[in-house]
Image (spheres, rainbow, N blue to C red):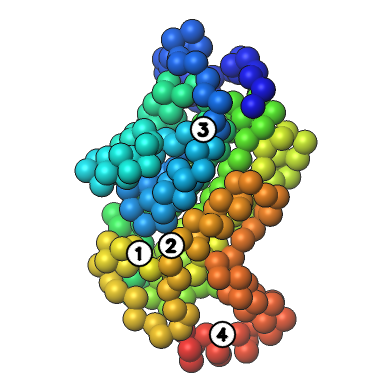
Amino acid sequence: MRSSPPPRNNPVAEADAAPVATAAARPARSRRQVVLITGASSGIGAEVASRLSAGGRWELLLNGRDEGRLGAVAARTSGAALPMDLASHEGCRRLTEAALTHSGRVDALVAAAGLGWAGAYTDMTPATVNRLVNVNVCAVLHLVSLILPQMISRGSGRLVLIGSVVGRYGVRGEAAYAATKGALIPFAESLRYELQGTGVHLSLVLPGPVDTAFFAHRGTPYKRSWPRPVPAGRVAAAVEEALTGGRDEITVPAWLGIPGRLQGMAPHLFRTLATRFG
């Protein structure tokens, strides 16, 4: 990769006027591309880290809240562990600062951190709603705003956001979660217009149910007979495709994108079928 000078404007300093490492203090640039993966301590994020570590093309910066599990993933993938809670803007700022200090740049962001919740919406506490919004929506928007300027200044970069088909269609018992994942769809679509001609590409990956500990962490098991959860490796493969290809949106599995056509053409029929089978 051709080396280029460090960006003149530091995104962290611009956003918060916080001190960051100067270019002279940063380590020499790696020939590998630097990817920051959030939610890397388990689930999809950990699987993405494992997949990207295999080819030796990427330098991995791994973020998660659980320091023990994150450290184990980092050791297995030869990545750098950057533990941080992203439920606040300050956490996102500190993670960005740590990533830029460690590697001097971020070539790609994979925003895989996320929280789930299932049950009647009226049973949710305000604190639970706020945390879902903070982690699933605000953290993504904050990280993109902090990391994007140095990508634009350099003229290259990749943003991969992990959404969910739940955000596209809605699912009974997951109203708040669907709302948080649904917010990423117009965000990605709108931001793409701003990124035209900058050399930065944004992809949105929309998985269906995935066979990970996500459902155990949210405290409610996955009970639907359809669709069946897919292995996390299939989502990781889609993320790798998003990082190296030109697709704007990837649904996993691909056939879960088909119901959207029915939803658009015959919304009443779609809701009838979703009520019966979903």
> According to the image, label 3 marks what residue?
34
- Amino acid type, callout 1: Thr
Q: Earlier in the sequence, mark 4 or mark 1?
A: 1
Q: Which disc is residue 232 wearing?
A: 2
Give the residue displayed 33% in from the left and 53% down from the top: 42
> According to the image, label 4 marks what residue?
271
Q: CA distance from mark 4 to mark 3?
A: 43 Å
Q: Earlier in the sequence, mark 4 or mark 3?
A: 3
- Amino acid type, callout 4: Arg
- Disc 3 is placed on an element classified as strand
Q: Position of residue 120 (x, y in %)?
A: 33, 75
Q: Tell me, yes or no, if residue 219 can be seen here.
A: yes
Between 73 and 248, the one nearer to me in the picture: 73
- Position of 171 compared to 254: left or right? left
For mark 2, does the 10 Å Cα neighbourhood hold few (<14), some (14 to 19), or many (20 or more) residues? many
Q: Earlier in the sequence, mark 2 or mark 3?
A: 3
> According to the image, label 1 marks what residue?
212
- Position of 20 compared to 237: left or right? left
- Disc 2 is placed on an element classified as helix
Give the residue displayed 55% in from the left and 32% down from the top: 33
- Amino acid type, callout 2: Ala
Q: Earlier in the sequence, mark 2 or mark 1?
A: 1
- Whether tag 2 and tag 1 are in contact, CB under 8 A, the answer is yes
- Disc 4 is placed on an element classified as helix
Q: Position of residue 110 (x, y in %)?
A: 50, 45
Give the residue displayed 43% in from the left and 67% down from the top: 231
Between 188 and 233, the one nearer to me in the picture: 233
